[in-house]
Image: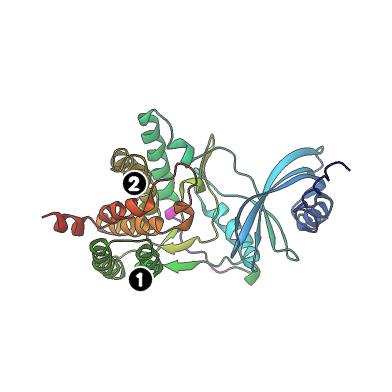
Amino acid sequence: YGPREAPPAADPRHGDPVLETTRAGRILQNATAESGWLVQEVRNADVISESPDRRRTLRYRVSARRAGAPFSEVTWHAHQYRSAEGERMMPVLRFLRAAAAPEIRVPTPIGYAREVRLLLVSSMEGRPLSGVLEDPIESRVGASLKRLGRALASFHAIRSPGPSARSTERPSFGRWDGAAEAQSLESAEARLRESGLDRRAADRLREGVAALRSELADDAGVARSPSMIHRHLRPQHVIFGSDGISMVDLDDASFGEPENDLGTLIAYMVLADLMRAGGTRLAPARADALRAGYLAGGVLRPNRLAAYTSSALLKLAADDKMRNGGVGAPDWARLTSVVIDEALPELAGARDV
């Protein structure tokens, strides 16, 4: 007898209604029934990211038409939630699309399939900020960051929605202030401690985080109305298009301090520098460009921006997704101490005296 052939690998789509094209077609037909879209068929369905405890993101290639136009192929994205969060996001996205300035683009909610908790949204075309930051011509990067700063200022200018005729149409947003940010540092500190810090670095971390949490929680001088913020504004959540800048993955959009969003973006730029060269080379000028664009239309408190940037940097250093970088990833055991010094410069300076 010849060698036995291995059985074919099981198709992960089998039995999954949102991935099997025939069943997915029926789901999308029902979900879009009130949107004006007519779905003929789903030609392809792929999972492009997954957070097991929250949601997964899919991409569909669909043959569909709207308002009597001929059928054509369109690409949609969908978020399948573990909870009923998708239903809440329908009025949230509608509100943000209506309230945002023309230079800010927000995905269009196309439909929601309650039985599989699938929120269908339009795809946002363009180049993500993560790609823009890789441009070898630094003047172009700076110009893009100034453009982003101006767009963020207009997004942060969105104010709380007024009462709606029907409760189902009223968007629901949380609040994320300095006290909430301070509390969120607790788990980041614990993960950093477990990463193998030496005693001196662990002591710096403990003292620095205690001071940072106190500074964040003390918002007595923050006398202004809360701003609309993204709250998890990573470079892949910003997409540069020809007709505006898109913001995607808005599940955590909240009312809070605008420095939260800018601090997160600056932290990503700082960490990218530290991972490449062990020091900050490009990040200072890039942060200046982002701030300059923002100040053309908004107001920033330098002390709050510094605090949110430090908090975001520590949380990034503790993020398992950042640590599991695969081949070529930096040695996080050595990098963590550098990140702590960058996030908590006062303590680093005191140590070196």
Location of the N terminus by quadrant is top right
Mark 1: amino acid: Ala
Q: Please, which residue is most extreme toward the left here?
A: 353
Does 160 lie within the magenta span?
Answer: yes
Q: Which of 257 and 159 lies nearest the eye of the viewer?
A: 257
Q: Which of 97 and 126 lies nearest the eye of the viewer?
A: 126
Vertical side of 182 occupied by 231: above or below: above
Task: Answer left or right for 71 relative to 269.
Answer: right
Determine which residue is flagged by label 1. 179
Task: Answer left or right for 246 relative to 260.
Answer: right
Q: Is mark 2 on a helix, strand or loop?
A: helix
Part of the protein shown in magenta: 156-163
Q: Which of 327 and 286 lies nearest the eye of the viewer?
A: 327
Mark 2: amino acid: Val
Task: Answer left or right for 242 relative to 184.
Answer: right
Q: Position of residue 323 (x, y in %)?
A: 44, 53
Q: Where is residue 306 in the image (x, y as percent from the top left)?
A: 28, 55
**Of pointers 2 and 1, the one earlier in the residue sequence:** 1
Count residues near mark 1 (Cα–Cα under 10 Å), then give few for <14, some for 14-19, many for 20+. Answer: some
